[in-house]
Amino acid sequence: MEALRIILTIIFMIDCVLLTVTVLMQEGKSAGLGSLAGLAETYWGKNKGRAMEGNLEKATMIFAIVFLVLAVILNLGF
């Protein structure tokens, strides 16, 4: 049983790092520096990172769910 707890703790720590990285990789909802040059108003500025942004949001949601589930499991005290 102790080996399972160690494995779950390692997975939990990896998930914590991945969750942090995915959150930090996301852009803010404000216009950002692209608006200074007028880039945000063009088609390229509006749709440049839509696919990557969507994937980052999905990954963040998955990592957050795994984080919560593992946190509950590890705190059950088995």
Image (cartoon, rainbow, N blue to C red):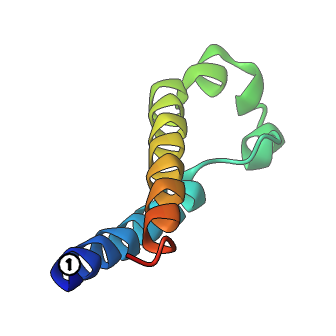
Q: Residue at x 49, y 35 (%)?
A: 58
Task: State whether residue 50 is above or below residue 19.
Answer: above
**Quarter of the image where one finds residue 41:** top right
Residue 36 in the image: above or below residue 25: above
Residue 19 seen in the figure? yes
Q: Is residue 57 above or below residue 41?
A: below
The residue that appears at 28% across and 78% down in the rendered structure is 5
- At mark 1, the secondary structure is loop
Q: Give whichever of 75, 53 is nearer the camera.
A: 75
Residue matched to label 1: 1
Left or right of residue 73, residue 35 in this image: right
Residue that sits furthest to the front in the current view = 78
- Circle 1: is it few (<14), some (14-19), or many (20+) Cα within 10 Å? few
Which amino acid type is shown beneath numbered disc 1? Answer: Met
Quadrant location of the N terminus? bottom left
- The quarter of the rendered structure image containing the C terminus is bottom left
